[in-house]
Image (cartoon, rainbow, N blue to C red):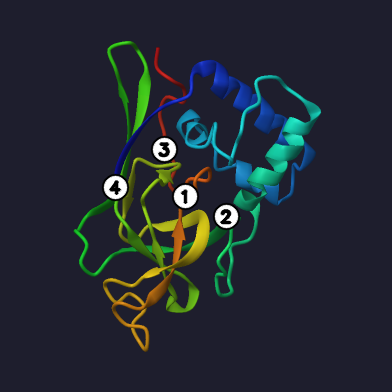
Amino acid sequence: MTSRRQLPGRDALERARALLVEVAAIDSDGPLARGLGRFGSWRSLAAVVGTDWLPLARRAAASTARITRQRLRALGADPATAELPDSDEPVQLRGICARLPDGRNGCLWRASVVGDDTGGLWAVEEGSDFVLRGAGGKSTLVLADGGRLVNADLLTEGDEVAVFGLSGEATDRVGIAGGAYGRGGLVAALRSGPRHPLLVSVIRRYDQGNDGPQD
């Protein structure tokens, strides 16, 4: 999967930052504030501005903060531990990344920012489907299409991550589940939705350096 999207402008990012400060102040010690801690850099924030994770109204309104709290609450919630149902609402899973049995070695995902001749900035995502191994060795297929790596430049096998996406099932084309299901059966999966891109957040490894769009 390779995707390219134009990053929001400085004004939009500043409005988003102000909105998140307001939201976090209301829930300074709760799960929502913890979830908002994932957006420690402008690039992290730019990954969700304008999506259903963080819709931005043209004008500030009392309802905007309320809607934002509702939409972002999943980012601070506890990860799911039971069987994943089909759901139209995003869920969180945590685990260790592993490549697919037939996948390439090395980097699973690469995120970068490139400029154009007009001074605009574009986010480029180059990701592969991977296996998320959770507690007890349970395997979930993470479908990269439409997804965004939130807080790192690279994702490699063995990284611990939190993944936020829509849950369901997908064809187990390489025998991830094993056992009675085997290759060609079904395996639990997380994917992007039309307005909720899948988010991959690396745990305990955050980008450093200049935290702001380049002029």
Is there any visible trace of residue 46 in the rendered image? Answer: yes
Q: Residues within 10 Å of mark 3 (few under 14, many from 20)?
A: some
Q: CA distance from mark 3 to mark 2?
A: 25 Å
The residue at the point 55 percent across, 70 percent down is 84
Q: Report, in whole angstroms, how far the alpha carbon at label 4 lies from the one at label 1.
A: 13 Å
Disc 3 secondary structure class: loop
Which three-letter amino acid code belongs to the residue tagged 3?
A: Asp
Query: Mark 1 or mark 3, which is nearer the start of the sequence?
Result: 1
Q: Which residue is depicted at the point 52% across and 57% down?
A: 166
- Look at the numbered discs 3 and 2 and tell me whether their residues touch, using CB distance below 8 Å: no
Label 1, on which residue? Answer: 198
Residue at which label 4 appears: 1
In the figure, is residue 198 to the left or right of 2? right
- Residue 204 locus on image (x, y percent): 47, 50
Distance of label 1 from label 2 (alpha carbons) = 8 Å
Q: Which disc number belongs to residue 90?
A: 2
> Which residue is located at x 35 percent, y 12 percent?
119
Residue bearing mark 3: 207
Whichever of labels 4 and 1 marks the residue nearer the N terminus, that label is 4
Q: Residues within 10 Å of mark 2 (few under 14, many from 20)?
A: many
